[in-house]
Image: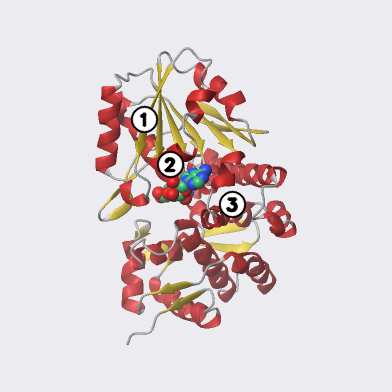
Amino acid sequence: MQNLEIDLPGQRYPIRIGAGILAAHLPAMVGDLARELVVVVTNDTVARLYPDKIEAALAKLPVKVATISIPDGEQYKTFDTLVGIYDKLMEFEANRHTVLIAFGGGVVGDIAGLAAATFMRGIPLVQVPTTLLAQVDSSIGGKTAVNHPRGKNAVGVFKQPKGVLADLEFLSTLPPRELRAGLFELIKHAIIADRDLYQYLEDRSDRFASRDWDFWESAISRSCRVKTRVVEQDEQEGGLRAVLNFGHTLGHLIETHTQYSSYLHGEAVGVGMLFAAFASREWGILPDEGFQRIRRLLQPLIAPVTLPPLDDDIFTRLLLHDKKSSAGALRFIALRGLGDVFIREGTTPAELWPLFERFTGAMPEVCRIAPVF
Ligand code: NAD
Ligand code: GLY
């Protein structure tokens, strides 16, 4: 098992990562916080796969464990679902000493986190992430949110959990597509800040589809270490934390232009990372050798993306709708080399569009724009 710690102003919390660690380590994480009641927020898929898993792990604690299961899917990361969670918490007579456990992927983590942040002005939260994406990214760092019809993750707060417990055995039931989507976020951390991890992943790409828990424990914990280091320096995204958005400029465009219906977030970010590396090379910042290394690792993992018809106007509108844009320009996360990322302020859609056209022309097997008939 790997033990990390994240050290934030006024709060430190543990991140435990390992295979089969739930029963041995969850009681200690929850025990000091809970008086009478622990409420597990999960979704229907995870509840079906792992019924009573948390309850069994906490059986020796003198607390009652109740479960709230929400429907599965990003489309349920809404105010209505959040209100449903409050309703259940009221029904269970939860109070400020109730501990809420987010048991699931990033959707459950984000909405349960927001519920914990706001119910009774805040109750303790423990994250038990069950997808790779949630284990390397969303369970750490305290971002919570629900979607608004006009904006993904439009409403949320920062709410740090009291602890994160990532049991790798949950990954054994994860659909391969979801595993690959999470892998892009794991690789993202290597690209932005850990060359050695990148090399480690290159040397072991044959394990990506495996249940080699030693490999996953090492890869996930090193990836989490990158995220914790960034969040420790900039908890509320005043500046540096934006580097975690590497690949997200094009990633968000892919998601919004396909109405979130065709590609998973991680898949869109995977293509976005390759584009960010491509753009960095075209700007003469990233040597070709660095770009080719990134291409060699990412390309075999990428399922081809086909975008609905797109021209420079639509491209500009989609990019500037992004909440990180201001005054017609955006903060593009660019690369000087592996592990060496920086924020390129003032990047305009007008300079990105020709690069994007070159990118789709050079790599249609990664991303292409459907022709207008
Ligand atoms: P998800 O939560 O939708 O989970 C993906 C699918 O896997 C779902 O169908 C889920 O039911 C299923 N699942 C979960 N655990 C499983 C398991 N062990 N076995 C089998 N199936 C399992 O998606 P995700 O990729 O985990 O998270 C995406 C969400 O995370 C998005 O809403 C995104 O906005 C958010 N996010 C938040 C942050 C943050 O910092 N808070 C960072 C990145 C992403
Ligand atoms: N996933 C990006 C962040 O946590 O800031």
Q: Amino acid at mark 3?
A: Leu
Dot 3: element: helix
Sequence-first tag of 3 and 1:
1
- The answer to whether residue 238 is seen in the rendering is no
Q: Residues within 10 Å of mark 2 (few under 14, many from 20)?
A: some
333 or 158: nearer the eye? Answer: 158
Separation (CA) of disc 2 from disc 3: 21 Å
Q: Report the label total.
A: 3
Quarter placement of the N terminus: top right
Residue named by callout 3 = 186
Q: Are marks 3 and 1 in contact (CB under 8 Å)?
A: no
Sequence-first tag of 1 and 2:
1
Question: Any atom of ligand 1 within 8 Å of the CB at mark 1?
Answer: no
The residue under the point 69% across, 71% down is 289
Q: Amino acid at mark 2?
A: Gln
| Percent of width and height locating residue 91 | 26, 23
Residue named by callout 2 = 236
Q: Residues within 10 Å of mark 1 (few under 14, many from 20)?
A: many
Separation (CA) of disc 1 from disc 2: 18 Å
Q: Residue furthest right?
A: 203
Residue named by callout 1 = 116
* Above-or-below relation of 85 to 92: below
Please name the colour scheme applied to the rendered image.
secondary structure
* Above-or-below relation of 49 to 33: below
Q: Amino acid at mark 1?
A: Ala
| Percent of width and height locating residue 243 | 52, 53
Sequence-first tag of 2 and 3:
3
Dot 2: element: loop
The residue under the point 64% across, 41% down is 221
Q: Describe residue 292's horizontal placement relative to residue 133 as left or right.
A: right
Give the label, 2 or 3, closer to the camera. 3
